[in-house]
Image (tube, rainbow, N blue to C red):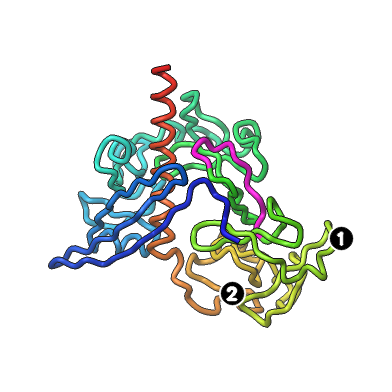
Amino acid sequence: MAGRSTTSLLLVIAALFHSSLASIIFEVEHTTHISTTNFKFSTSELDCFKQGKVLYEPERKCYKLLEVGPCTGDNQWLVLDQEEVINGNGNLRSVCRQCPCCGKPYRAVYWPIDGQCHRLLRESKELCPSEGTTLQIDPFGEGECACKIDPPHAEWNVTSDDNGPCYPLYHRGPCNNGEILVASDNTTTCKRDPCSQHNRGNSSELYVKWEDGNGRCYKLGSKGPCQGDSTTFNIHPVTRRPACISRINQIVDLPPNCDTDQNGKCREEINLPSVSDYVSDLLNSAQKKRSKRRTKTNKQHV
């Protein structure tokens, strides 16, 4: 069953080489209208995207967003240029900007709605009351309501106002009886539950098929097929698929390109994030930012 998302991101990637320049074309489709924007990235930018980083043009080097990186000013960090995305050419250009909440004695995030700094953990539920959402920092350095990462959640009806609920993957969520919500190609889909015989009438325990292993159903959070005292069967926060995960090194500490075996150790490289996944996440954030600006502008003219 196709995802019933109001907004979907369709990535059409074409490599066009002219001397040292490569370009990728991304098509953004909305259910009520279709707007196609061509983003041309240099080979240097693509190399950075492969590392989960962005190119800082003045130095021609790759850096992670939301870190000090190349920035030298007091309380500065590297973010995407919001004005370039909204009013410029839509390019994903990184810039050093003042971090208004970085000097706080607690983890804080700038909330653009009221222009104040809020405690990232303590005020998450107040600012993001929708089911399955939590307060996070977007690539522009501002607070947003996004789906929980641990355990991995995903949106069903994607909205630009951050008010939509998120549901845990491999649960029924918004799907029909006998179906589960899974992540597929940067969207979500309801599919038949292959472990329905175990899950029927059992709300306290959830069985999930180990698709990358022996194909059998195991209870989430249990030892399942995993070996090692601290390894359990859960949903990997990066691949968003069932895997054996070690709790000695918390899942957030796993290398981003690490797939795990039955012992919870790195089995093979899976090249995460891929260029398309990483860039589509950035483009999704950019699209949200533009939508919010349009909504705010329209309200001011009413």
Q: Residue at x 68, y 82 (%)?
A: 214
Residue 216 falls left or right of residue 256: right
User: Which marked residue is nearer to the observer: mark 2 or mark 1?
Assistant: 1
Circle 1 Cα neighbour tier, 10 Å, few/some/many (<14 / 14–19 / ≥20): few
Q: Foreground residue, 272 or 6?
A: 6
For residue 57, the mark is none
Specify whether residue 163 is painted magenta: yes
The residues tagged by marks 2 and 1 sit, at their Cα atoms, a distance apart of: 31 Å
Horizontal and vertical percent for residue 250? 62, 61
Q: Which residue is drawn at 68% across and 50% down?
A: 174
For mark 2, does the 10 Å Cα neighbourhood hold few (<14), some (14 to 19), or many (20 or more) residues?
some
The x and y percentages for residue 92 are: 31, 48
* Quadrant housing the C terminus: top left
Q: Is residue 227 visible?
A: no
Whether 241 is among the magenta residues is no
**Does 190 appear above or below 17?**
above
The quarter of the rendered structure image containing the N terminus is bottom right
Q: Label 1: which residue?
A: 201
Furthest residue in direction bottom, as rendered: 214
Q: Which residues lie in the magenta part? A: 159-169
The one of 101 and 9 positioned closer to us in this rendering: 9
- Amino acid type, label 2: Thr
The secondary structure that dominates the magenta segment is loop
User: Which residue carries the number 2 mark?
Assistant: 260
Lateral position of residue 211 relative to residue 12, left or right? right
The part of the image, by quadrant, that contains residue 86 is top left
Q: What residue type is labelled 1?
A: Gly
Residue drawn at point x = 22 percent, y = 64 percent:
22
